[in-house]
C-alpha cells in the first residue's frame, strides 16, 4: 500500500483518453489545436487574460519562470526547504545563468512577510552583494501547509514594496485551492503573483505541467527559453490535451479534493503525532524507528523524513480501504 | 495530404498501447521497471554495454550529450546546417555554458574527414581562439543524406587523431540504419561515436528519445544534467515504455523502412528535380513558385525550403495512396 | 625593430606618472577621486551625459557591454573576423550566458547596412532560430579600416529599424577618430551607438580601458556584472588615473595620430602591395615567404597573417628611424 | 587615520618601481620575461613544481580556481561568511556556470573537519540534490582567524575521504603565514590544497594576485578560462613584476608582519572587547554606538560591523603613531 509520493501515482483515465484522442496528425510543437486552447482555458479559470505554456516537469516550469523573473546577477528569495533549493539539482542556477537562491526560514516551509522583509534587509545595498530580484513561494508547501489568498497577498504587497517579482511553485496548487476554497485568481495575480507553476503530474496528469504567466509580456521570452531548454516537444498536443482534460471540467479539483480527504482521514487518526497541521495531501508524523518498522511490516510504504519523522503523501487515486487500514494502523501504534 | 514533417505524425498504436500499459503506480523518475530495462535493451541492440537515458526531445538529447563532451570554454565542430546550429534556439550554448559551434561546409549537410580536418587546422593553437573538443554529425543529415558506417569510421579516426569526442545526432538514426543496412554497432561505437541521440519521435514514438552513451562513464554526469535541465520526468516509465515498444522488436526498423520507401517512391517520380540524392525520408526538389502552387492546389502540404526548392518529408504512417498521388502530381509538373 | 602589435608597446610616461600619483590611500574599488571624475570627463568628451566604467582589458569591456545589450537566448551580429569572434576565447558566450555570435562578411572586416540587413533577414522569425538582439562593429576594424561617422549612422539607422542595440568595439577608437576627424559624439551616440569599448591599452595606456554607456540606464547593471566578473579592482584609482591622463588633455589623440602617421609612412612605401587601404595603424601587405624572410633578416619583427600576407602594426611610440628603415626595406623588396 | 581596509592602502614603493621597470616593449599577454619567471619563483617558494597565473583581483583568482575544481552541476562547501559567498556579487555562480555554494557554520568564519563532514553528510546521495565537489576555506579568515597548517591538513584529509577538491582563498595568505610561522608548502599542498588564491593587493601590491595551482594539470584550462573571463591583460608584465617584487625577496612577509604587528598592538589595548582572537590583521571589537562615535570624533576611520561591533583592519604601511593613538583611544573608552 503505497503512501510514498503523489508523483508516482497513475494518471487519470480521462487524461489517458485525452492523450489517445490527441494522437493524430497536427501541426508540430505548439501549433496544434489543443495547445491553441490553453491560453483561453486558463484565462477563464483565472478570470483574466493569461499566457499558458505546457512543459513536462515542475522543475522546468519553476526554472523557466525564475529565469524570466530574475537576471543572472541577482537572487531569488525562497524557503530553505523549497523544492527549487533542495530537490532540483541546481536547476535554478542552470536556467538563470547563476542567480542565487537566498534562503529564508519559517516553520513548515512557509514564509511570512516579516521573514521575507528581514531577508531583504539583511542584504547590503552595494555591488558586492547579490541583490534579490524575486521571491518564490510554494503552495501547498513542501510540508503540506497552505498559504491562503490573503497570506499570499500580504507577501505580494511586500514584494512590490521591495521591487521583487513573485513566483508561486504550485506543484500542489490544486490541493491548495481545494483546501482553502480561495479562487485561483485570488490566490495568484490578485495577490501579486507574476508567474505560477501549475502542477498536474501529482494530481492525475501524466507528464504535463503548465507555466501560467500573469505578466503576459514575458510569454514570448519564456517560449524561446522553453525551446532553448529542450522543452518544446514536437507533439506538444499530448501535453496540452492532458491539461485540458483536467481543467476544462472540475477534474483537477476533484482529484485534489480526493487526495486532501485521504490526508485528512490519516491526520484525524494521529492528532498527537502531527509535526505540522495537515492542510493538503502530505502528513508528517512523529514515529519511532520501531513504530515505522511496525507500519512497514503491515505493508505500508512511506518515506523516512528525518530522525523520528515519517512522511505519507496521498494521491488522487488513493484506495479508500488502504487509507482506512493505515489510519487504523496509526491509531494502533 | 501532409508531407510537411515527420515530427507531426501520430505515434504508432503499439507505442500508445505501451504508454497505457505503463500507466500504473511504480517508482517515480527512472526507478520504474520500464526504465530499468533500457540499458539492457540498448546494450543488446548495440552488441555491447551501453548506458541509455530517456529524454522527451531531440534537442535535450543532443545538448545533454554535447554538454558532457565539451567544456564551456571549447567548441563543437558541426555542419552549418546542423539542427543544433539552426533549429535549437541556441540550446547548445545554454546546455554547455557557452561552448562555440564551429561551422563546417559540405553538400547536403554532410561533412568529410577533409572538411573536418581543415576546420580543426584553421584554429590557431593558442589561448585566444576557442579550441574544438568535439564533433557532431547528423545521420541521416538534415538534407536526407546518410553516412555509411565506413564514412562515420573515417570521421571517427580523424576525431581520435585530433583528440575530439564524437556525437551523432540520430533524430533519423532509424532511417539511416534502414537505408544503409549497416548495424547499429558499426554505425556508432565501432566507428568512434561516443554518444548518440537516438530519435523515436519522428519514427512512431510520441515524445521519447534516447540518449545512448557508449562512453558509459559519462552516464552519471548526464543523469545529473538531465535532472538539472528539468528533463527527469516523474513518470518516466511512459517514456521508457514507448522506446521499448519500438526497439524490443523490429518496429523501429519497420517504421523507418516505411517512410524511406515512401520517399523513394517520390524520388523515382522526380529524377531530374532532386537537389540531393534521396537516401532517407526527405526529398528536396527544385520547383518553381508556380509549380509549388500547383502542387498545393492539389492538396499537398509541404515546406518551401528556399528559392526554387521545396521539401517533402515522409512519415512511418504515410498513406500509400497519398504517396502515389503526389508522385503522379510531381511527374505531371 | 618591433612592428608586431600595439598591444605590447610601453605605456606613455604621463600615464605612468598618473599611476604613481594615484598611489595613495583612498576609498577602495571605484570610490576614489579619480574614478569619480570619469563620468564627467567622458561626458565632456562626448558632449552629453554618459556613464563610464574602467576595466582592465578590451575583452572585458566588449563582453560586459554585450551581456548588457543581449539576453542569453538571442544573438549578436558581427563580422566573422571581429575580435569578439576570433580572439576572445569565447568570452562573449561566457559573459552573455550563451548568446550566439551571428557572423557577417565584408571586406576588411567592415560591414555595410546591406550586409547587416541580409544577416537579419536570413533568420527565420520563429522560436527555433536564435533572433538577433544587437550588432557589434569594430572601429577601426581588425584590418585597419575605419568607419566614418556617417557610415556608423547608416548602420545605426538599420539597427533601430530592426530593434537591435549597437555596440562599438573601439580598441582602436582613437585611431579611428584621428583618421576620420569625426567627433567622438558623431562617431558614437549621434550615430546610434549604445555602448562603446574605448581602448587605451593599444594607445599609451598600461592596463585600463573604458566602457562608455550612452544608454546610461545600463550602468548600474554593468557595474554589478563588472564585479561579478572579477573586474572591480580594489585600487581602481590606478585604472581611472591612466584614463584621465590620456583624455583630460589631447594625449589620446596625439598618440593615435603618431601611430597613424607611422602607418601612413609605411603604406606610402608599398602602394602596390596593400591588401587593404591603410586608414589607421595597421598595414597588411602581400609578401612572399622569401620577402618576409628578407625583412626579418633585416631585424623587423611582424606577424605572418596568412599565405602571402604579412601584418605590421605601429604604436604611439614607434621609433621614427625604425619606420624609415622599414619603409626603405619594403620599397627594396 | 584610516583603519578601514587593507584593500585601500597604497602599494609598496618597490612594487611601483617594479611596474615602472617593466614598462617597456615586450611580448604581449603572458609572453614576457616577468611572467615567464612566475612558475619558478613560486615553485621555489612552495618547494615543489607549481603553476602560477597572475590575475588582477582576488575574486578572479578565487572563481577561476573554483570553476576548474567544480563542474556547473555540483557544489562548493564554504563558510557562510566566506568572501566568495558574501562579497563577490555571485561571481562563483558566474564563473562555474551555476554551481552551488553549500554553506557551513563555525565561529570566526572558520570551519572544522566535523563541520565539513556534517555538511557533506547532510546531502542526500541522489540526482535531485546538488552533490559537493570541492571545499573552499579562507586563510586568514574573514574574521582574522588563521588556520594552522595542521588544521588545514585535517581538512585536507577529510576532503580526500569525500573526494572533494580543496581551494584556499589566501587574500591574506601572507598574514596567515606570518602569524603561524608555518611554511607555505605545509600550509597548502602538503595539507591537501589543490589551488591557492595568493593575495598581494592587501599586502603592498597594486593590482596583482596570483592563482597557484598545485594540481598543475589544471593550468592549461585555467589559462583559457582566464582569457575567456577577460583577465588576460595585454601588458601582463606589469602584474608579474609586482608579484616578483614581493616574493623574490621577503617583502611579502615583511609587509604581513608589519600589519599583523599593528593589529597585535591594537588587540593588546582591548583584551576585554575582542570578539575574536586577533591572529592576523583584523580586529573586531565590541563597542557601543557612543563609543564608536567617540573614536570617530578623534579621527579614526573604521567599519561598523554589526550591532555593537566595529572592525579595524591594519595595513602594511599603517603609521605607527596612528596605531599608538588608536590603542590609546581604545583603552580610554
Image (tube, coloured by chain):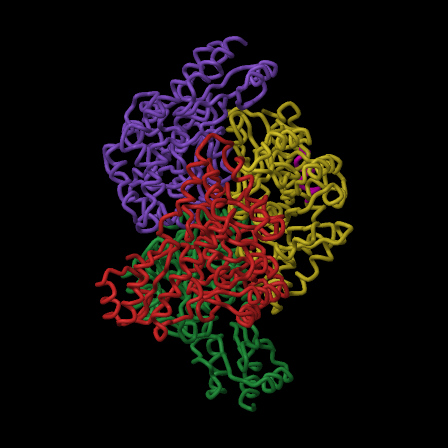
Chain colours: A purple, B red, C green, D yellow
Task: Please tell me whether the stretch drawn in magenta is mainly helix, strand or loop.
Answer: helix
Instruction: Identify which residue, D1 or A300, lies in the foreground.
Output: A300
Q: Is B202 on the left-hand or right-hand side of C207?
A: left
Number of callouts: 0
The residue depicted at 73 percent of the width and 45 percent of the height is D189
> Left or right: where does residue D216 sit relative to residue A245?
right
Residue A150, picture quadrant:
top left
Camera-side residue: B37 or D224? B37
Q: Quadrant of residue D77?
A: top right
Reply above or below: C300 against D47.
below
Decide if residue D199 is on the left or right side of residue A54. right
Q: Where in the figure is residue A96, as x and y percent of width and height?
A: 44, 44
Report the front residue among C291 and B330.
B330
The residue segment tinted magenta is: D256-265
Q: Position of residue A100 (x, y in %)?
A: 48, 39
The quarter of the picture where residue A169 lies is top left
From the top left corner, tell me how far across and down residue C181 is, in percent: 36, 73
Q: Is residue D232 visible?
A: no
Quadrant of the rendering where the C terminus of chain A is positioned: top right
* Residue shown at the point (73%, 56%) measured from the top left: D41
Along the line of sight, which residue is nearer the eye, D295 or A38? A38
Q: Is residue D262 magenta?
A: yes
Residue positioned 49% across, 29% down in the render:
A80
Amino acid at each position: 500500500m503505497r503512501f510514498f509520493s503523489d508523483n508516482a501515482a497513475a494518471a487519470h483515465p480521462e487524461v489517458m483518453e485525452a492523450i489517445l484522442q490527441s494522437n493524430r496528425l497536427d501541426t508540430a510543437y505548439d501549433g496544434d489545436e489543443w495547445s491553441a486552447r490553453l491560453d483561453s482555458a486558463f484565462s477563464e479559470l483565472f478570470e483574466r487574460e493569461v499566457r499558458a505554456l505546457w512543459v513536462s516537469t515542475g522543475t522546468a516550469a519553476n526554472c523557466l519562470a525564475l529565469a524570466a523573473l530574475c537576471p543572472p546577477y541577482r537572487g531569488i528569495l525562497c524557503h530553505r526547504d523549497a523544492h527549487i533549493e533542495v530537490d532540483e539539482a541546481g536547476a535554478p542556477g542552470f536556467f538563470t545563468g547563476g542567480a542565487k537562491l537566498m534562503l529564508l526560514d519559517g516553520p513548515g516551509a512557509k514564509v511570512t512577510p516579516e521573514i521575507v522583509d528581514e531577508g531583504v534587509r539583511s542584504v547590503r545595498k552595494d555591488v558586492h552583494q547579490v541583490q534579490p530580484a524575486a521571491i518564490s513561494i510554494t503552495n501547498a508547501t513542501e510540508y503540506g501547509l497552505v498559504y491562503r489568498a490573503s497570506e499570499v497577498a500580504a507577501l505580494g504587497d511586500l514584494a512590490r514594496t521591495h521591487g521583487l517579482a513573485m513566483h508561486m511553485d504550485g506543484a500542489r496548487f490544486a490541493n491548495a485551492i481545494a483546501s482553502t476554497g480561495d479562487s485561483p485568481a485570488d490566490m495568484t495575480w490578485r495577490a501579486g503573483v507574476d508567474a505560477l507553476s501549475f502542477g498536474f503530474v501529482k494530481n492525475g496528469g501524466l507528464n504535463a505541467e503548465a507555466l501560467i504567466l500573469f505578466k503576459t509580456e514575458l510569454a514570448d521570452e519564456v517560449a524561446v527559453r522553453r525551446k532553448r531548454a529542450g522543452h518544446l516537444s514536437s507533439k506538444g498536443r499530448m501535453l496540452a490535451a492532458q491539461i485540458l482534460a483536467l481543467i476544462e471540467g472540475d477534474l483537477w479539483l476533484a482529484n485534489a479534493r480526493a487526495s486532501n480527504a485521504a490526508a485528512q482521514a490519516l491526520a484525524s487518526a494521529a492528532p498527537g503525532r502531527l509535526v505540522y497541521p495537515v492542510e493538503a495531501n502530505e502528513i508528517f508524523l512523529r514515529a519511532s524507528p520501531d513504530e515505522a518498522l511496525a507500519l512497514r511490516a503491515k505493508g505500508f510504504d512511506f518515506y523516512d523524513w528525518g530522525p523520528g519523522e515519517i512522511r505519507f503523501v496521498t494521491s488522487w487515486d488513493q484506495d479508500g480501504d488502504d487509507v482506512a487500514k493505515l489510519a487504523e494502523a496509526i491509531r494502533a501504534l
